[in-house]
Amino acid sequence: MNYKNYIKLTFLTLVLLHGFTSCVYASENANPEEVYKTAWEILNDKFYLKSKIDLNKWQNKFENKIKTSEDAHFYINKLVQELHDPYTRFLTKEEFTEEQNIINSMLTGIGVKLAINKPIIIDVLPQSPAKESGIQSNDYILKINDMSTHNLTSAQTISLLRGEKGTKLTVKLKRGHEILTKTLTRKDIQFTAVSSQLLENNIAFIKIDSLIPENTSKLFKDEITKLMSTGGIILDLRNNSGGLLKNAIEIADMFLNEGKIVSTVGPYGKVNELANSNKLSESNIVILVNERTASASEILASALKENNRAIVIGKKTFGKGLVQEIVKLPDDSALHVTIASYLTPSGKSINKIGLVPNEIIHDENKLLKRARFILLNSNKTQIAAL
């Protein structure tokens, strides 16, 4: 990928959640005023939707009021709230460290995945404290210890669930009309982003739980290599809330000889990401999606659908078409900043709209059967025509 149009040379470039990431080198004794000033400069320079707010009046608004790091963080949060963008947010040092751990597949907690905008459990990881205690998908988290989840962001809820290995927490859950209380002990979680199995009739089933871990595309390549001779692939992206943009691009590239994968539109213009003739598989593909398929997983599904390499079935996806950059501040806190929007290969924006499948199927219990039927009864020409 070519990041030069997006990131100044003064930043340390990494590739993190949802898009492009950069870091300001931290100092051990960062000046609180400098922390706020840096945050303002980043937002003024990079925020994609800045035409909606006059950032200039915030530059010196809190001059002489910022004495401590807590002051700096308080006023950065006030500034971020004025942007009215759910994806631009401030991260404490601890929250930023937690994100790095997730990217490196280092998880300590109870082993659940949450919905993007509600404290609803969308998946429970195998061999996790949550699984062992009987927690299920669609359980609604009412409280974590004595803290209500009402008005908490997903990031705040996740932060409360995670913690040091061996520490205990109590969660209050709503399951239908039933209220449950579970006490769990946090532990290191073995998180595998990609799993596969061979179904009847030589059909491969590959599930990508997340595109966050940095090695997801490599893990996917390993699975594809093992399943080269299959008669078709069912790619399950349900409940996949996204992750690294590079993972989505690299996985799409494994199925394409040519064509556009995605375009990003930002302050510095438009960048097209094209297939690099790295095609590994000729197999027909059916992709499973639902309303919790979001962000980078929507990019992957759109790229294969619009290049006529896959049929997408299931529910309309979440609709997150904005790209974030994570910028580390001088005191090791950080900002998520919306820096661009992305377009599907045909030039469509799916932000707040979602990807519409080739076939809308609301009953998820029927998806696997339908996917197998499509693969067993369609040749490549029929697949592309749907």
Image: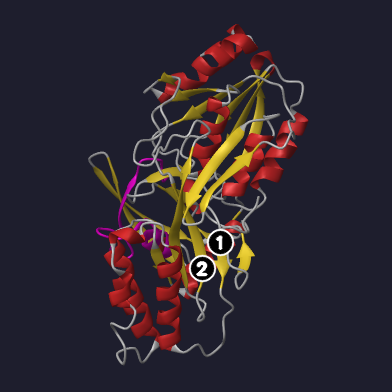
Residue type of the residue flagged with mark 2: Val
- Label total for image: 2
63 left or right, relative to 244: left
Q: Which residues are magenta?
A: 132-159
Residue 150 shown in magenta:
yes
275 left or right, relative to 184: right
Residue 15 shown in magenta:
no
x, y percent for residue 164: 52, 69
- Which structural element holds mark 1? strand
Which residue is at the far front?
269
Asked if one can make out residue 169 in the rendered structure from this viewpoint, the answer is no
Q: Quick one: 118 or 270, which is closer to the camera?
A: 270
- Residue wearing tag 2: 327
Look at the picture and state if 334 lies above or below 382: below
Q: Which mark is residue 21?
A: 1
Q: Earlier in the sequence, mark 2 or mark 1?
A: 1
Where residue 279 sits, quadrant-wise, is top right
Q: Quick one: 54 or 212, which is closer to the camera?
A: 54
Q: How is the image coloured?
A: secondary structure
- Which structural element holds mark 2? strand
Residue type of the residue flagged with mark 1: Thr
Q: Quick one: 173 or 274, which is closer to the camera?
A: 274
Residue at (59, 36) in percent of width and height:
261
Q: Are marks 2 and 1 in contact (CB under 8 Å)?
A: yes
Look at the picture and state if 24 lies above or below 384: below
